[in-house]
Amino acid sequence: MENVKLNTGSYLIEQLNTSQKNDNVFECLSCGACSSSCSWFEGEGGPVPRQIIKMASLGLDDLLIESGMLWDCLLCNRCTQNCPMGITMGNVVRKGRSHPKAGKLISKDIQNGIKTRLTTGDVNGLTREEFIETIEWMSEEFADETGDPDATIPYDQKGAEFLYLPNPRELGINLLHLTAMAKLFWMSDQSWTMSSRHTDVTNWGYFVSDDEIARKMALMVIEPAEKLGIKTLVLSECGHGYHVLKVLAEKLIGRKPEFEVLSMPEFVLKFVKQGKIKLDKNAHPYPVAYHDPCNLGRKSGLYDAPRELLALCCKEVVELVPNRENAICCGGGGGMLQDSKSKPKRMITGKAKADQIIASGVQNLAAPCLSCHRQLGEISNHFKLGVKVYTVAEIASSSLILPGDKKMV
Ligand code: SF4
Ligand code: SF4
């Protein structure tokens, strides 16, 4: 410990509000309960939560940054559930990530994605023209499929009631997810639109813990939505996107957005309750297990709506054990999935989830987050689980009961 400067001048200690319980690293008992509940536990390398807290409380900023633990943490907060002192690991790690010297360890993919998103409105750099071309082509297909010329995927419609904000993957490799959402909007009989300017529910400013970037990205969605005059923003299945736009947005932008924010399952349930959307429980006559994404569940409190919706679409919804507040992370959170070099690490952090899936005995999983969806598919292949992974929108749209005046070819 020679040459190590303790406490004085520590950026991290200055940033942590140690008068607040969830930030108070000085209250750490070194009990290790956090370490034993981490997805990295028993894996090779990775963060040791107790060490993170200890280094933070000693003001060992440089040592903590060089350890790499800040960027290996999944920000899942599972360890926080077991902390007797209520220290919130996600807060501590995010404050560590905001350290001026920590930026050099941000993956190139995340750095590039942030630049692209800030300049184009889409993390993959989809241009407005490409968006329009894709949506118009999908609209034609959708109208053919339904035989209804009014069944379209609208964009930039002023005064529409709902704005649907997709995950960028829906405009690339997950086009079927967007078609599933279009079917659900079509059945709801509501006026809805997408925006050709901002096609991205994600917010990687959250991962790098830069509130200014996160604020800009949130405003890139919020201001055009307000200009369109929508009443409700419906978010695609994205854990951290929901957490930022539903839970953090008001604090980030300094005011309430002028619309309500709903997750996709909350939107569908609203119209199920009004009798507009009807679902067939027998459409999935096998057990389907629900995966709680950390950002939706533990960090935003959204547990019931997806379960309620799945129960209307599947004969049996199975709980993975543990679940809800104690759910196990998919192993790809905190920006790790967005780093293209992370797969070897993610197959270590995904082991706890794979074991949980094996113990449940299910062959079908539902995950309302496209990042979890991808990670769960990869761990299914890697650990040879033979499990099919669906988004909740896919399950809901394939359970639709069509009224007499609607059909699908
Ligand atoms: S990965 Fe999750 S459980 Fe492990 S230290 Fe980070 S927040 Fe805690
Ligand atoms: S569980 Fe809480 S008190 Fe125990 S070592 Fe971890 S951070 Fe410290």
Image (cartoon, rainbow, N blue to C red):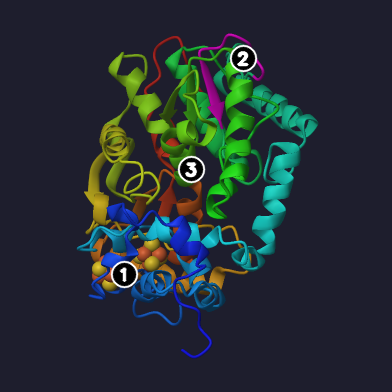
Query: What count of labels does the image hold?
Result: 3
Mark 2 secondary-structure assignment: helix
Segment tinted magenta in the rendering: 155-165
Could you tell me the amino acid type at mark 3?
Cys
Q: Earlier in the sequence, mark 2 or mark 3?
A: 2
Q: CA distance from mark 1 to mark 3?
A: 24 Å
Q: CA distance from mark 1 to mark 2?
A: 46 Å
Mark 3 secondary-structure assignment: loop
- Percent position of residue 146, x then y: 55, 20
- Percent position of residue 183, x then y: 50, 25
- The nearer-to-camera label among 2 and 3 is 2
Q: Nearer the viewer, residue 365 or 254?
A: 254
Residue lying at the far right of the rendered structure = 129
Q: Which residue is mark 1?
A: 355
The image shows residue 176, relative to residue 6, as above or below, that is above
Q: Which residue is mark 2?
A: 228
Residue at (54% x, 22% y) in the render: 163
Tell whether 300 sits left or right of 221: left
Where ligand 2 lies, by image quadrant? Answer: bottom left
Residue at (46% x, 31% y) in the render: 250
Could you tell me the amino acid type at mark 2?
Leu
Mark 1 secondary-structure assignment: helix
Could you tell me the amino acid type at mark 1?
Asp
**Would residue 144 be seen by someone viewing this image from the given angle?**
no
Tell whether 254 sits left or right of 247: right
**Would residue 185 be seen by someone viewing this image from the given angle?**
yes
- Percent position of residue 314, x then y: 29, 39
Q: CA distance from mark 2 to mark 3?
A: 23 Å
Quadrant housing residue 175 = top right
Residue at (43% x, 74% y) in the render: 47
Q: Residues within 10 Å of mark 2 (few under 14, many from 20)?
A: some
